[in-house]
Amino acid sequence: MTPPPMTPHEADGLHRQGLVAAQAGRFDEALDLIGRAIAAYPSVPVWWANYGLVMESLGDVAGAANAYAGALNLDPSLEMAMDGLLTMAEAVRRAGDSARAEAFFRRAIALNPKTLAAVANLGVLLRAQARRAEAVTLYGRAGRLDPANWAHPYNLGNALAEMNRLGEADDAYRAAFALAPGRAEVRANRATRVLAMQGQAEEALAEIEAVVAQHGTIDSLHASRLYLMQFVPGLTMPAIAQAHADWGARYPDRPAPAVAAPAPKIRIGYVSPDFRAHPVGFFLEPVLANHDRTAFEIVCYANTANPDWKTERLMAHADHWVWTTGMDDEALAQRIQADGIHILVDLAGHTFGNRLPVFARRVAPVQATWAGYVGTTGLPAMDYLISDSRQSPPGSDGWCIEGVVRMPDAYVPWAPPENAPAVAPLPLATRGHATFGSFNALPKLNAEVAALWVRVLDAVPGSRLLLRTPGLDDAGTAAHALALFERAGLDPARVDLRGGAPHREFLAGYGEVDVALDPFPYSGGLTTLEALWMGVPVVTLGGDRFCARHSVTHLASAGLSALVADGPEDYIAKAAALVADPAGLAALRGGLRDRLAASPALNGVRFTRALEAAFGVMWQRFQAGQGRASFTLNFD
């Protein structure tokens, strides 16, 4: 006979027995009891939610999420079910399953569109995946759901800034600041992501210094201040070096950890947020690809929030790859020490996403900084700065707390983009007027640069200036850039502004440029190499700080040191002389790619052997108890 149907009271009794079993840790029994109650009366939302809690306790994330969703289908306002579904979304996000986290968040929003946490957290998730346009929509929606919360316009500002919609980003940051005037991160991000990116580095630095004065214990603020100092022409090297040393003095060095001797390989750890299509990624790939795996074992510690195609290429060249974005400093320090790293290399300095606080803990016997910053870190635990004799000429050691390692050629190697278009004919030959250009980032633009470039254009009647860089698509940013040149006396009709573009298209833009003008005091690095590869000579001023001498090194590698000016008058003369000889300039343009291809800058094997020799000297000095010291490598 078929048993009589269960009464509601009996079903509720089973549900309660299931809760008792769950509290006692008998989860399988609890699932059976609550499941039988649901089977008899499937329209009770709380039972579904409790079934989800039991499944969550058993580690069944998908099952728990489905149960919570079932409860919400019956009652979209049931907070415990929504909390459970969002908890599952966060659990899979932390585990690295972004696709499933997105699905859970979207399910929560579909079940209750007014669920603020789901809307806001999905925005965070999508922005981390560089899906910024979707994130912007969600942050706007979160702001409408919760208009008194500063975090939503702040997040909106961050996403808009990353899209180079700087005017809108500024509005969002101002809205966040109006809601929470005391939030340091709002003022700091507006300074670094809007003001600096609009070519207002001095204003950005002043804003950061005001925030540091109020929030002096926040390391990221100090990092922003030190980095922004590099862009300001009026600051001297003694002031910049002292600021770095003052920051570093907060972190006295510690004894080196005990590490097993190389047997036989030296274990090298590279630490960076920029294992991606970023200058660091382009400089590092030739090294990772050419390391001698019989003598070195390579571990990459990737604090990279937005991995891309370059990340995949770098991963293929590493012996071990450790994602560190979810690790706090203590966890990362423990991991590095557990890995037995002999030499730990910083590839970020004081740029965004750095892990200098981990280096401050002295987690490896030898620690060095290379390629990702523009000079000293100021950190007592950083033993070496890897440079070259042009980046760090004789007499510059005093600006560094580290020992300076001077590489034989350039301080970085480079592999040109495989899809770069062919070198275009000289525009001057067909246009009848000279076009000077700069494709450098806008923080490098300042009033002194604009004034000198205007003098260059004045020296060449009819000439024009082409600026191309992400951010110039934004009307407000373009207006700031034009205003610099107008104040310097240039007719804005002689300036062409272009924004960002896919990389191949961006490089093709050099087909409109006859001669590139290098900014100062922050010189072009990767930008200079790309210009040369596209056949465009670069005139540079150089300077006394590390960041001022990138082009000096790259031009020397290509045998073009004659394009390094002795001062402003020589800069103008060199730029004008190049365009005054169209035949000579065309010949130079046609041979630049071959010249660069044959230079040490593109010899990844040669550079890597020198870098490995430097690592060997560092390790020998450590084993001998000699401590840090500057030294020079050569192939003579």
Image: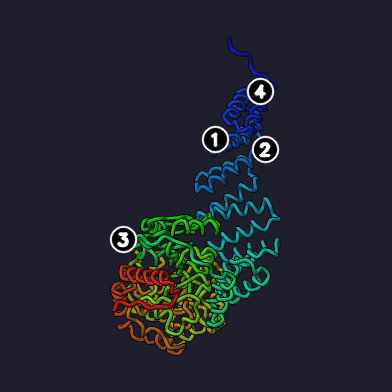
Q: Taking 337 as reference, is 552 above or below it?
A: below
- Circle 3 sits in a helix, a strand or a loop, which is it? loop
**Number of the front mark, 1 or 2:** 1
Kindly identify the amino acid type of the residue bearing the numbered disc 2.
Leu
- The amino acid sitting under disc 1 is Gly
For the residues labelled 2 and 3, the Cα–Cα distance comes to 60 Å
* Secondary structure of residue under mark 4: helix
Q: Earlier in the sequence, mark 2 or mark 3?
A: 2
Which residue sits at x=56%, y=61%? 160
In front: mark 3 or mark 1? 3
Where is residue 344? Give x, y as percent. Answer: 45, 64
Q: Position of residue 382 (x, y in %)?
A: 49, 70
Q: Could you say where residue 18 lies in the image, as x and y percent from the top left?
A: 63, 28
Mark 2 — residue? Answer: 78
Number of residues whose C-alpha sits closer than 10 Å to that of mark 1, classed few (under 14), some (14–19) or many (20 or more): some
Q: CA distance from mark 4 to mark 2?
A: 20 Å
User: In the picture, which quadrant includes the N terminus?
Assistant: top right
Q: Is residue 582 above or below residue 422?
A: below
Kindly identify the residue that appears in the image at 65 percent across and 33 percent down.
23
Any part of residue 479 in sight: no
Q: Amino acid at mark 3?
A: Thr
Towards the viewer: 363 or 218: 363
Residue 129 visible: yes
Q: Tell me what residue is drawn at x 51 percent, y 81 percent.
A: 450
Disc 4 marks a residue whose amino acid type is Ala
Q: Is label 4 in contact with label 3 (beta carbons under 8 Å)?
A: no
Q: Earlier in the sequence, mark 1 or mark 2?
A: 1
Alpha-carbon span between mark 1 and mark 2: 18 Å
Disc 1: which residue: 63
| Label 3 sits on residue | 294
**Disc 4 target residue:** 11
